[in-house]
Amino acid sequence: MLKPLTITILGSNSALPTANRYPTAQVLNASERFFLIDCGEGTQQQLRANKIKFSKIDHIFISHLHGDHCFGLIGLISTFGLMGRKAPLHIHSHPHLEKLLQPQLNYFCVDLPFQVVFDDFDPKQKGLIYTDKHITVETIPLKHRIPTVGFLFKQKLEERKLKKDFVFIHQPSIKDRIAIKKGSDYINKDGALMSNKDITLDPPKPLSYAFCTDTKYTESILEQIKGVDVLYHEATFAADNAHLAKKTYHSTAEQAAQIATKAGAGKLLLGHFSSRYKNLDVLLNEAKAVFPNTFLAIEGDVIHVGQ
Amino acid sequence: MLKPLTITILGSNSALPTANRYPTAQVLNASERFFLIDCGEGTQQQLRANKIKFSKIDHIFISHLHGDHCFGLIGLISTFGLMGRKAPLHIHSHPHLEKLLQPQLNYFCVDLPFQVVFDDFDPKQKGLIYTDKHITVETIPLKHRIPTVGFLFKQKLEERKLKKDFVFIHQPSIKDRIAIKKGSDYINKDGALMSNKDITLDPPKPLSYAFCTDTKYTESILEQIKGVDVLYHEATFAADNAHLAKKTYHSTAEQAAQIATKAGAGKLLLGHFSSRYKNLDVLLNEAKAVFPNTFLAIEGDVIHVGQ
């Protein structure tokens, strides 16, 4: 069975605050491991509001060091400490973050009962920065005013599945089953060779999710995100402010849709909305005209990747 | 006429977050000058939600350097910058704040279009730290785990009021009116001396507001806050956790009420509630048993001092 991959939107507004919109933060749930992506001010409150258990978050990925993507870190770490967390917390980010955050941790989080591990990456290079049994995470270099990356989350290919009738008839040993799942052929009790493709089923296609904010329109990311199931792409502006998008290294909704189309994405999620758009339909409509399977990322939304 | 003095509660929870409660922050409106008192994470969003114009805030007072009282500063300052603020912003605090905040400002708020002025105070001494035409602000040394102060906001005594019938009958010159308002007697056209007290009315009694959090029970503050119109006093715990209050240098609701009683306060506002109390009535009731004119400070509440 396909392992679910879900995204919960905690915040998808751009830098200026509104009464009910939060700066960027979202949580990816991959096989009940929770990955926090960006951490704008108020993230800890949004985690509470969305009933996400703090203790399940061991890794935080920070796209870039603009405040609306990381000002919530110190409060979240402080709260982890007050709650008595013991497990190490990994923060994957530009190397500068440690220099900025460590003095605050030293002052505000004395006797923190867990370790904060800064896992630096080079934002100019695409690279594998995390892997576990189920998923991998790669950086996607983006084009913004300061060094910025997106993140590509990919499920690992699962083992091949044994066909039920084969198991019923031939009763392979545990050892044989393990080998067959990894691709081995099988010699049955009559000494006949059974080809792996005849006794197994393909595993489900691994799901993938690409998080791309903040960035101007850039086709340099297309190869890396080709065929991604869900693409979150920033859409700070509508076409009326294309000049501002260009000036500030952001994208329009239409540009986000062009990237989704050219990448062959399954679904497009728009985010990082400028506060000037009280009604976000203009952004949604402009994108849908190019890429129909587009949705707005709104606080509290839960997106099931692959559905 | 008495100039209004109002307080808007932006956050009154203690450190651990909940879905709909914010850490400490409130705004005092004194003659349309807005003073921000403490600045927990999410303050800028709460300012928006309560429709308080960012541009009217020129002074921020920070009680102490625990995160739930100051983690919202960097986000708020950053937003002020994005909004093109020009006026200097004064932050009144313990001297350590500048050392903690300046590196963040240098990194995240490059080319800030206004000046951040750190107005340090000595938290061990009570002292006058701000004065303008209408009010004064004094620090109130409290007893917490780290150096902490409360703030006493006092309206200045207004000039004496000319009695209407005196003005109608004697038609004093502008110069004379100014002198009489300041307390001078008057010699009328017949050469007779008219005593100031016979030709003027007392100005309204100046209003005052004391903000006292975080602190354990301490009678050392009583003399300074004697007769205050509204006392905001922390009430982190109910009586069931008096031992925790003692251990963590916080107060119980009953202790807050005892301080209000002994200080002869007009009204008591309870705040800084522990997240363990889902229903705050236990805190309210314990305080009211000692000091009946007690209220809970809840996000969005607007308190009119002197009413």
Image (tube, coloured by chain):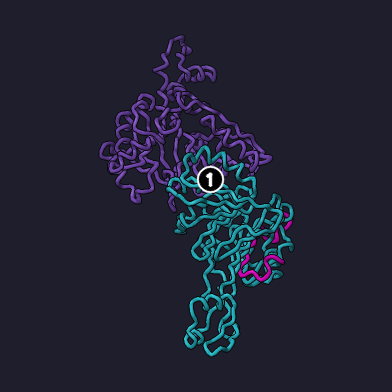
Chain colours: A cyan, B purple
Question: Which residue carries the number 1 mark?
Answer: A74
**Is B262 drawn above or below residue B288 in the view shown?**
above
Residue B296 position within the rendered picture, expressed as x and y whole percent measured from the top left: 36, 43
The residue located at (42%, 45%) in the rendering is B13
Residue A111 visible in the displayed image: yes
The quadrant in which the N terminus of chain B is found is top left
Residue A248 position within the rendered picture, expressed as x and y whole percent measured from the top left: 71, 52
The picture quadrant where one finds residue A139 is bottom right
The picture quadrant where one finds residue A211 is bottom right
The quadrant in which the C terminus of chain B is found is top left
Kind of residue at badge 1: Ile
The foreground one among A220 and B8 is A220
Specify the segment rendered in magenta.
A223-244
The foreground one among A67 and B128 is A67
The residue located at (43%, 49%) in the rendering is B21
Residue A239 position within the rendered picture, expressed as x and y whole percent measured from the top left: 70, 61
Residue B230 visible in the displayed image: no
Residue B232 position within the rendered picture, expressed as x and y whole percent measured from the top left: 39, 36
